[in-house]
Amino acid sequence: MDQGLSLNTLPLKELRNLIRNNQFTGSTTGCAAGYLQANLVILPAEWATDFLLFCQKNPVACPLIDVTQPGEKYLQSIGRDIDLSTDVPEYHVFYDGEFETAVSDLSTLWREDLVTFVLGCSFSFEEALIQSGLSIRNIDEGKNVSMYDTSIPCQSSGKFSGNYVVSMRPFTSIDAIRAIQITTRFPKAHGAPVHFGDPSLIGINDISTPNYGDAVEIKPNEVPVFWGCGVTPQNVIRQSRPPFCITHAPGKMLITDRLSSEFAVL
Amino acid sequence: MDQGLSLNTLPLKELRNLIRNNQFTGSTTGCAAGYLQANLVILPAEWATDFLLFCQKNPVACPLIDVTQPGEKYLQSIGRDIDLSTDVPEYHVFYDGEFETAVSDLSTLWREDLVTFVLGCSFSFEEALIQSGLSIRNIDEGKNVSMYDTSIPCQSSGKFSGNYVVSMRPFTSIDAIRAIQITTRFPKAHGAPVHFGDPSLIGINDISTPNYGDAVEIKPNEVPVFWGCGVTPQNVIRQSRPPFCITHAPGKMLITDRLSSEFAVL
């Protein structure tokens, strides 16, 4: 299966069927334009309350869209047809905070005590940026977005603590100003950037080597602009060591039936 | 008369009386918190239509608040008590586009064919920045804001053409992001910045030597952020050479009876 940019024009239902049948396991950046994309964090119920509070305390890193009851794989709020255990291109499985394996569905791993957190994703504002005439470098280059561990601390909640992960898109300053205005309208997709310019100020020592996703070109007259990223919980989980946890793979998101514009403010 | 920061706490009516009586001729940055400050451009009527269109074509550099009829010194829209010929701390007088002299009132220069353009000023959003917890470096240092000629071209109108002048305030990137959000709400005060970061990209070769106003410290983790500036018309007038023109002196503004917040959008 070609996992390149041709998928970006597939209707949502067809793309979801490919994902559900494990025929597409790639990045969803630029896919299903206009639809809200989401990060997933799946935890045993006994860890869920602390994580719910963690999201509340860190709304830029973890903009919470909705949460399931234990064992439920469905959330009416994001789409009637969505199965949270199959409709993400790739899942990451962690035991005791250590990454164990990547899987394309959760059929053999599902448990009745699992609570699924659906968190907003910056892919959801990319369409609005493009519609405003801006170019998203990683989409233009057919790559996953660049993501980096940082030194920006999250607010702790119970056992959960750690630093922000950020996504990066390069822009000229005038385009960055426009991107700040536009993304401010999408608080459920991480909202405005958390930093631009010198990466070392937020603990990124080598901008050419992302911790997740792909490197992209930054042109001489551009600055890197950094947004909160839903990979942050994966960083936090490595530190907080819940006995079992499942997340989406970075850049490979749940695509919902809701429009991003439904979540825009102003 | 002390023209330092103690004036910032003077009530508007008292400050206006000092200005009217030529007892205060300094910068109005940080003065009369909350009140809309304005740039002035005063032109003979036969040049007014072209300049009106110039403002229309360049709303970021020249956000037009209101315009008088020829010979009128008053504009109800900005305050019943305001005399446009006396209530600016210092005026600049140009003949054939050349700066001739600075005066503190226009009593001996007034003509019945003069049309006054009142343009918004970035000082009007400084209070909103401060209320959001940001620091304005030039206010902290008791100085006029730094202003620079640039290579950013204005749209031409009739005889009027030239490049933007910008004001500059340094911020950390996270504060700059907040400043972009806040100033976006004030389109009549130049709105969002037009540039941040590398000054050479907009034709500023030496950031430590402003063309107007004072130099301020830029700390190592800060970037200069540049907004459109109402000194732009003065630059344009030098090129366009109207036979007679009066403006405010850079940084020495008309303070109106209207609140800046009345002009905020959103």
Image (cartoon, coloured by chain):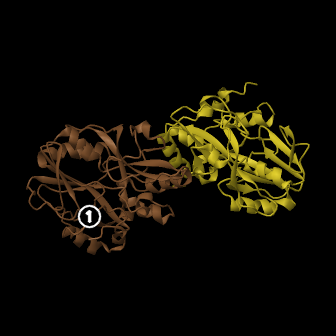
Chain colours: A brown, B yellow
Q: Quadrant of the C terminus of chain A?
A: bottom left
Q: Which residue is mark 1?
A: A78
Q: Chain of mark 1?
A: A
**x and y percentages locating residue B21 in the rendered image:** 81, 34
Residue at (65, 43) in percent of width and height: B167
**x and y percentages locating residue A216 in the rendered image:** 42, 54
Asked whether residue B72 appears in the rendered view, the answer is no
User: What secondary structure is marked by label 1?
Assistant: loop
Task: Find residue B159 and report its image quarter.
Answer: bottom right
Q: Quadrant of the N terminus of chain A?
A: bottom left
Residue at (82, 50) in percent of width and height: B238
**x and y percentages locating residue A76 in the rendered image:** 22, 65
Asked whether residue B46 appears in the rendered view, the answer is yes
**Would residue A183 be found to the left or right of residue B86 on screen?**
left
**Would residue A161 be found to the left or right of residue A192 on screen?**
left
In the image, A3 versus A28, the foreground residue is A3
**Tally of numbered tags:** 1
The three-letter amino acid code for the residue at tag 1 is Ile
Residue at (41, 47) in percent of width and height: A208
**x and y percentages locating residue B14 in the rendered image:** 71, 33
Vertical position of residue B7 compared to residue A188: above or below:
above
The crowd level at tag 1 (other Cα within 10 Å; few <14, some 14-19, many 20+) is: some
